[in-house]
Every structure is written in C-alpha cells, then in structure tokens.
Image: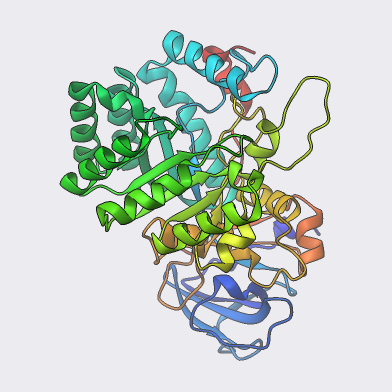
Amino acid sequence: MSYSFISPPNAGRFVLSNATLPAAAVAGYEAPAAEGLVRADIVIADGMISALLPPGEAPVELAKSDLKEGMVWPCFTDMHTHLDKGHIWPRNANPDGNFQGALEAVRADREAHWSAGDVKKRMEFSLRCAYAHGTSLIRTHLDSLAPQHRISFELFAEMRDVWKDRIALQAVALFPLENMADTAYFADLVGLVRKKGGLIGGVTRMSADLESQLDALFKAATDNGLDVDLHVDETDDPAAETLKAIAQAVLRNRFDGTVTAGHCCSLARQDGETAKRTVELVAEARLAIVSLPMCNLYLQDRYPGRTPRWRGVTLFHELAAAGVATAVASDNTRDPFYAYGDLDPVEVFREAVRILHLDHPLDTAARVVTTSPADILGRPDMGRIAVGTAADLVLFSARRWSEFLSRPQSDRVVLRRGKVIDRSLPDYRELDSIVGA
C-alpha cells in the first residue's frame, strides 16, 4: 500500500504515533537524537498539537495512525519568492539564461502583459502549488516601478485576505535604489507600502551614490515603521560590495528594524580577508541573509560555451558560524530568472543540501526552510512543531535522511489544522489562456 493512502484518523483527537521529527524544527521536546532526528508520538486535538510524547506513551484510548517511523515536519516557510513574475516563461523566455537576458525579458513581459487579471491568475496558480506542497508562509517581492506598483500592491492586498487561512503572505517593494531620485514616485511607493502593510526593498548597485541612497532608504523605513528586504550583489564580480555598505548603513543610521539581504553572491568571490570583514559587519548589524541556491546556480557564472566554475551561492556556512540568521528559499519560478521550479520547499531543501553542503552532519539542516525563515519573517509561531501550535504538518514516508533526500517525496501528506488537504497540483493548461501553450 502506498504511504499516500495512510491518513490520520477522522477524529477530533488522535495520535500520529511512531513519528520521526527533525529536532531543529521541534520546540519543547527533548529526546535522544540521531543526526538531528528524534522519535515521538504527536497528539492532536481540535486541530492543535496538544502533546509531544515518547513513542508508545500516548493515551491508548486515542485513535492512532502509525507512521512506522516516517518523518513529520512543520509546514514550510518560503521567504523569498516572486509571485508576480511566476510562470511567464512560455510567453517570454530568457534567450540565453544569463542575468541580463532575464532583466530584459521580464521588462518586456511586464510592460506588455502585467494587468491585474494577468498577475492574479499567475499568482493564484503559484499559491495553489505552494499550498499543495505544504507551505504556510510566503514572502514575495513585487516589481514596483510606476505604475506597476499600484497594480501589484492592490492585488496583493486582495490575495493576502483571500489566502489568509491557508498561506500567510508578506510583500516587499522591489525597485532600483536609484529610482528614489524621483521623489514623488518614492513618496507614493512608501505610502502605498505602509498602507498595505508591506516592506520596503530594492536592488543595490555599486555607485558613488550608494551611501546616500541607503541613508535615504533607512530614513524612509524609520519614518514609516517599515522593515527592509534587499536584493544584494547578485553577481560574480568580487568588486560588488553593497552588502558591506548595507551593514555599515544600518549601523550608521542606528536602524532598529529588521533587514534582510538576499543572494549576496559576490561575497563568495572575494578574497578571504575581505569576505571575513564583511561577514563580521553583517553580524554586528544583525542582518539576516537568505540564499537562493537553485536560481543562483542557474544564473551565475553562465557564459556561452563555457562550463561554470562556481556554484553561485553566498558564504552560507561562514555567515551562520558568525551568528547571522540564515535561510534558503525558492526565488523565481518558471520565469526568465529561473526556468524551472514549483515553489516546493522540499525541492529547495534537497538542492540546498547538495549545493551548499548542508550535510555531514544534517543535524540542524531542516531549520533553513522551517524555523529560521519563520523567525526572520517575524513569525516564531510558525515553522516549528510545538505543543500549543496548529497541527500544520507534512508527513513523509521517508524515515532517515538518505531516504528523504533521495526522492522528491511526492507521496507526502499535508495536514492543516490536523486535517488532510487535497494535494492536487494545478494543471499548466490552466495558464494557456494568458501565457500560451
């Protein structure tokens, strides 16, 4: 019998017995661990986790589903996505797979097609995929050049409300920092972001104006009570040091909001001493770093007729060792920046383990798509298995890391508030009317 047919009992109170949990994603339960995996019985009552007990110690009168040592994870957090860009590849592909080609293809597509109806249909498709895979919290960056910022943020506010019982959504305004020179546009954008409960973001580039741009950005964020999430140094050029400039700006402006930096690819191209100083500054400024391993592996070091020489990712281990909050995420999905993907954090985790060498041991690796991104996004109530939290769980047939990482786990079962959801994925044909077959 396929594991996908093993479902929790249809009862208000029941036990997921003989489960294997990633200890890094469990709070308030101590048990002997083997490479970061612990065994437990999970007692669920009225959609909440009411107890975590050693295997066999759950009350005998409760209905049980024996997981036979199968893994149970909390629902996932995908903290860096682009829901507004998703699935445009069929109508506007990247001609050569490089970063410049992606910029130009997205610009052309946005200017030609991004009405509210177009973005809504693609965004809904993406959210249905993420929900079926077991995600409960997403942060998306929204292209915020005028007039697109008004279309996208109005739509986002609508989608956040519609999806609030399935996926918690956050949005970041994405724009080149040099566009702040248009003071009327920037004031309108900041006001809109504040009104819609979003974050201010942007793309940083090396320039003579970078320091003043960052000061203006953090002043606007302070004045409007906004957190900051930036696209940083997405290049193989070792001279790109905007991550260092951001850390210095946070300290100089004494900014006390949260600051997240995504990508930070060039850090891995710099000499050891230069990179070490930047890592120390990032830790001092309390920045959080999110690596996008699949997208950066795809885009970085891509040159015609030449095999890539590096993996495109940041200094993940060094940052984590310095005490920096670190996580991984999906980034783009079937668009010119990444031709593939399905907003599946299991795929992101599996590839991150390979690309970033998060293994040997794997004892804390599970945090990168669960507790760490949830904490960075200000939701410590999510991304962990703990008594008193919602029974939003993902059940796997895999019992050990080797089993988990060797297959795509397509037979997983997703529980929301203790009930099995329909994991049917939307058919790509649904998008044919807007992106073509």
Colour scheme = rainbow
Q: Nearer the viewer, residue 269 or 67?
A: 269
140 w.r.t. 27: above or below: above
- Residue 76 visible here: no
Residue 45: name its quadrant.
bottom left
Q: Is residue 287 left or right of residue 407?
A: left
- Looking at the rendered image, the quarter that the N terminus falls into is bottom right
Q: Is residue 151 left or right of residue 316?
A: left
* Count of numbered badges drawn on the protein: 0
Up-down: is 31 above or below 265? below
Res. 407 in view: yes
Q: Residue furthest top?
A: 112
- Residue 85, horizontal then vertical, whole percent: 50, 26
Q: Is residue 41 above or below residue 169?
A: below
Query: Residue 153 placed where, x, y %?
Result: 30, 30
Q: Residue at x 71, y 53 (%)?
A: 350
What percent of the width, then of the height, locates residue 388? 40, 76
The image quadrant of residue 59 is bottom right
Residue at 46% x, 62% y: name it: 283
Up the image or down, 402 lies above or below 213; here it is: below
Image x and y of residue 195, in percent: 19, 38
**Quarter holding residue 173:** top left
Quarter in which the C terminus is drawn: top right
Q: Say which of 421 and 125 sits in front.
A: 125
